[in-house]
Amino acid sequence: MLSLRQSLRFAVPATRAFATSRVVLQSKPAHKTATTLAEVDSNESLIGPGAKEGTVPTDLEQATGLERLELLGKLEGVEFFDTKPLDSSRKGTMADPIVLDSYEDYRYVGCTGSPADSHTIMWLKPTVKQPARCWECGSVYKINPVGVPHSHDH
Ligand SMILES: [Zn+2]
């Protein structure tokens, strides 16, 4: 017969395995990938979501940055790259922004600083209501709406 002391000892769980808790750092980006032009609001929104598991990625899933912007544009019939280079001779300021003529009430601007290519391209989206400021160099861009072109004027 076991003594009281022995029973107590047996009741205590054996050596408790020490579980090393592994800290899993969430590297998942906090951005939302733009699926339409209207959703493009930063460089991060132009990072493709990648392929769904077990599938081959499509161009749209893989494309990032400039390429993605172009693809999104194509889906909506917008051409980006027929535009003249931006004025990079100076930095726009809030008081004296770089003014961009646009048929739309917004435009996508790829800023590389002043002089041109002094920083990696930053995609900005100035609208008629709100000028955009480059995160990298602080240059300010403003939209000057020039009305809608009429290609079917008969
Ligand atoms: Zn810039």
Image: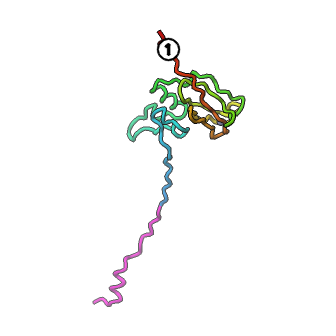
Q: Is 56 displayed left or right of 151 in the figure?
A: left
Residue numbers of the magenta segment: 1-21
In the foreground, 22 or 70? 70
Q: Position of residue 75 (x, y in %)?
A: 45, 27
Does 138 sit above or below residue 101? below
Main SS, magenta residues: loop
Q: Residues within 10 Å of mark 1 (few under 14, many from 20)?
A: few
The quarter of the displayed image where residue 9 is located: bottom left
**Residue 100 on image: x %, y %:** 62, 27
Name the residue carrying label 1: 151
Q: Is residue 17 rendered magenta in the image?
A: yes
Q: Residue at x 47, y 39 (%)?
A: 33
Mark 1: which secondary structure? loop
Q: Quadrant of the N terminus?
A: bottom left
Indicate the position of residue 124 as horizontal and vertical percent values. 58, 35
Callout count: 1
Instruction: Tell me which amino acid carries mark 1.
Output: Ser
